[in-house]
Image (tube, grey):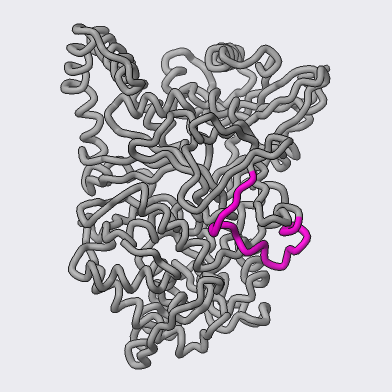
Amino acid sequence: MGDYKNLVELFETSIERHSGSQLFGTVKNGNWEWLTYKAVGEMVDNARGGLAALGVNDGDNVAVISNNRVEWAVGCYATYGLQAGYIPMYEAQKASEWKFKLVDSGSKVCLCATKAIYDKVKPMIGEIETLEHVLCFEDAGEDSWSKLLENGAANPTPSSQPDGSKTAGFIYTSGTTGKPKGVILSHTNIASNVNALQKIFVLNGDDRSLSFLPWAHSFGQTVELHGMLSMGASIAVNDEIPNLIPNLGTVKPSVLYAVPRIFNKIYDGVNKNMSEKSGMIQGLFKAGIAAAAKKNAGESLGFFENIQLNLADRLIFSKIREKFGGRLRYAVSGSAALNKDVAKFIDALGIEVYEGYGLTETSPIATANFPDNRKIGSVGKPVDGVRVVIADNGEIVIYGPNIMQGYHNRDAETKACMQDDGGFKSGDMGRIDDEGFVYITGRIKEQYKLENGKYVVPSPLEEELKLSPFIGQVMIYGSNKPFNVALVVPDAPALKKWAEGKNIDIEQADNAEIQSLIDEQLKEFGQNFKGYEKPRKFVVTMDEFSTDNEMLTPTLKLKRRNVLKVHQESLDALYT
């Protein structure tokens, strides 16, 4: 392990130390094929030479529009070696969003995952002043990735070690409230996070992850790509989300980096599966979960509880773990708050869950739970070098070497979130207990006041309601209103199965039986809400929130303003 000063040093040190070990695995013709650290290092050398031949120099920016793949990572480290910045974007975004970011970042080169993306971006060369080259990871003649590597092999270009203050790239925020902001992250910002990570999660060449969180997001990029590589571990790149569970069984990861919706699906899927088993198995499952939760909380078990736990683990839990490959040591959750009951449930299955907290602006880790320092329900303690304080208004303020350099071309917005003493105002509300564990209580911007003066933070309530197997998506609404209401999108597969044999048209949102079902679910899964938090009325819609209709960000956060543009009239009608 090393105290890395920049990401070039991190990459080259790992290539040298672990040259013969497996680094990246990809599926080809149904089989997993692996590249060694040495092979990836040679690809980076060639890509660096190819980019240099295109005129990429110190201070330039190279953009990439791609899901996770080997070429994404190779382009990243090749760019760093030229002291240029890497600007990632999502394949699922619109061409207008790519263009905005290409213009805003002043990118000189754009790497494209597919020919379809290449064909949309190539014409922008004449429209964007700084854009000179558009390349494709697939075959595109002279603009192909293979041609870049070929040119690079003929134009060997040594890497240079950037100063820690040098920009490693921009990561654009999701833009829930307006135009995306390019978060400027330096080599020190990201490297400091990796250094801190190495001190709390010690991995080695036997460890492996299955990568499906986008590297275009800071969580996936810093924690998984840079973090795993820095410790000599291997990364299997998931091909398609529907293949995630089968791939887990094949790849057998020891580490799973995921977001709460993945853990929620595991929770929901296991419970649905158990509901179809015999009464005896269901009883053993519930008793086993209860005993495991009690044991994990540090309580001693009675004679029969130990028997129930051992039986449940051997007959049920071990089979569930086997679906995840049977080697899972760490399940790391980030990006949003993980429901406490879900965390306890996954933990009870014998898969330890570690929740952390951070933002793109903090590179991203600010706090984390880790082995021997864990409290379910909290987001852990500040990582090495980071300090967290709670402001008078309840806002979390973060200090440390991981704090961004600012928002690109957005000085006013940078000033608004940065204190004079270097503290970053997170926009999140929280508290710190007497042992130093941090708890998130909501987003300041999402918080609103009801007519009775009570404050409501909707996102934690929405996460609770989404634990219902019949509620796929939900938004709680009530700003300056007498009470809360909800907009509910039912879970389509669950609704379809429920409706079998009942002669119910599940496309009719106003169907009385569907309305009754959703009413029951809101009451059951909102039973722990305070009285004023509970939605008294609701609207059902069959139109999912998605990135395509711009109701979700690329990281699947709710764009409340956009949802209201479509549904506010029907929500307001609930008050008449």
Q: Is residue 458 left or right of residue 93?
A: right
Instruction: Give x and y (percent) for residue 196.
Output: 42, 54
- 340 up-or-down from 499: above or below: below
Q: State the residue in front, 475 or 46.
A: 46
Indicate the quadrant where residue 332 lies: top left
Q: Kindly tell me whether residue 334 is visible in this rendering.
A: no
Q: Kindly tell me whether residue 411 is visible in this rendering.
A: yes
Instruction: Give x and y (percent) for residue 494.
Output: 44, 24
- 202 up-or-down from 36: above or below: above
Determine the residue positioned at 63% across, 66% down.
101
Instruction: Give x and y (percent) for residue 57.
Output: 52, 85
Q: Is residue 247 left or right of residue 513?
A: left
Instruction: Identify the magenta region.
Output: 397-415
- 111 up-or-down from 193: above or below: below
Q: Is residue 463 left or right of residue 238?
A: right
Indicate the quadrant where residue 461 lies: top right
Judge whether residue 444 is colored magenta.
no
Indicate the quadrant where residue 242 lies: top left
Q: Quadrant of the C terminus?
A: top right
Q: State the residue in front, 350 or 5.
A: 5
Determine the residue positioned at 33% across, 62% down.
230
Determine the residue positioned at 26% across, 45% down.
254
Q: State the residue in front, 1 or 224.
A: 1
Q: Quadrant of the N terminus?
A: bottom left
- 564 up-or-down from 318: above or below: below
Q: Is residue 81 left or right of residue 131?
A: left
Q: Residue furthest bottom?
A: 154
Judge whether residue 405 is colored magenta.
yes
Determine the residue positioned at 57% across, 80% down.
60
Instruction: Give x and y (percent) for residue 137.
Output: 41, 72
Q: Residue furthest front?
A: 434
The tally of labels here is 0
